Amino acid sequence: MPSVDDLLTTRQLQDLLQVDRITIYRMLNDGRLHGFKVGGQWRFSRREIEAWLQEQQNHLESSTASARLRGPLQPSPQALPLACIQTIQDVCAEALDIGSVTIDADGTTLLTEISHSCEYCRLILSTPEGQKRCMASWKRLVSGQMHACHARLLCVTAPVQVSNQVVAITAGCQFVAQPAPGAEPDWRAYLPTLATDLGMSEHDLRVVADTVRTVPTGYLPRVSRLLHRIAGTFSEIGQERLDLLGRLQPVSGMSQAQENR
C-alpha cells in the first residue's frame, strides 16, 4: 500500500494529464487507469501513474516514424489501446450473440482477435482463401448497411474515426436472419459452392453449420445501431489517447534533449 504522500487525488491527476474529470472516470471504467477509493474519493498511486506515463511514452516512440518525435502526431491504428478495445469488443459480441472483429482501415490487418466466433466461421478462417475472403467482406462496406459476406452470412460494419480520419473498421458478423417457417436458408444451399471455393470438405462445413447464430429479423436494426455505438466508443477512446500522447510528446522531447546533453 503506497504512503499518503505517494497518492494523487482525482484533481491532481487531472492537472497532471491535462484532462477533465469525466475522462478520468472513463479511463477508470475501461481499465486504462487503476485506482482505489479512500472515504469515497478516488486515489491513485503516483508511482503507478508515472510507470503508466512512461509506458505511453515508450509506445509513442515505437509507433511514430521518427524516434525523435518530429512533427505533429497523425491519427493511426496506434492511437487505439488495443487491449482495451479487445475487452470491450469481447463483451459486446457476447451480449449481442454475434461475432465481432476490428481491422485496419485498409482491410489488410486484424487489430483484434475475433470475438465470440462460431465453429463454422473458425473452420472457414482456418483456410488461407477463407481468411482472404473474410477480410474483403469486412472491408467492403463501412456505411453500416447489413450485407452478406462471401459465405452468405450477414455482416455489418462501422468506422472508427480519430480526428475525422478512419483508422479502423469494426465488424459484427457470423450471423443470419431467421428464415420463413419451412424455408431452406440461402447460406446452407451455398455450402457446396463454398466448400469448393475454399478447397475444403463440404461434410466438414455441414458438421458445424448449426453453430451459426440465427437472429430474428426485427433484431437486425438493433445490431447495426449498437455496433455503431461501439465504434463510436472506440473513436472516443482513440481520440482521447491521441490527445494525451500529444501532450506527452513535448515531455518526451525534453527528456531526450536532457539525455543528449
Image (spheres, rainbow, N blue to C red):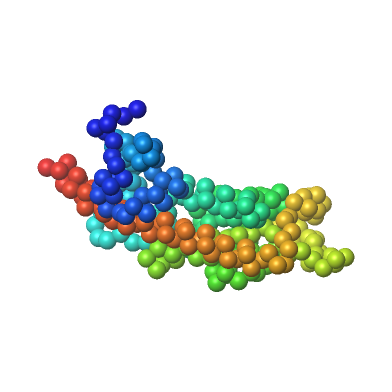
Q: In this view, does 97 lie to the left or right of 3?
A: right
Q: In which quarter of the image is the N terminus?
A: top left
The residue lying furthest to the right in this view is 182
- In the picture as drawn, the residue positioned furthest to the front comes out as 39
Q: Which residue is drawn at 28% across and 29% down?
A: 3
Observer-nearest residue: 234 or 252? 234
Q: Can residue 86 be seen in this view?
A: yes
Task: Place residue 48 in its image quadrant.
Answer: top left
Residue that protrudes farthest toward the left in the picture:
261
- Looking at the image, which residue is at 69% across and 59% down? 175
The reply, left or right, for residue 70 in relation to residue 21 is: left
From the top left corner, tell me how far across and down residue 199 is, in percent: 73, 56
Image coords of residue 219 (percent x, y): 68, 64
Q: In which quarter of the image is residue 77?
A: bottom left
Q: Quadrant of the C terminus?
A: top left
Q: Report the number of numbered marks.
A: 0
Q: Write the residue at 36% across / 36% down.
A: 39
Nearest to the observer: residue 15 or residue 70:
15
**Residue 68 visible in the shown view:** no
Q: Is residue 82 above or below residue 153?
A: above
Residue at screen point 72% across, 67% down: 217
x and y, in percent, of residue 259 in the image? 17, 41
**Which is nearer the eye, 181 or 6?**
6
In the shown orientation, is residue 111 left or right of residue 212? left
Of residue 79 and residue 70, the one placed in the foreground of this image is: 79
* Residue 94 screen position, x and y as percent: 63, 50
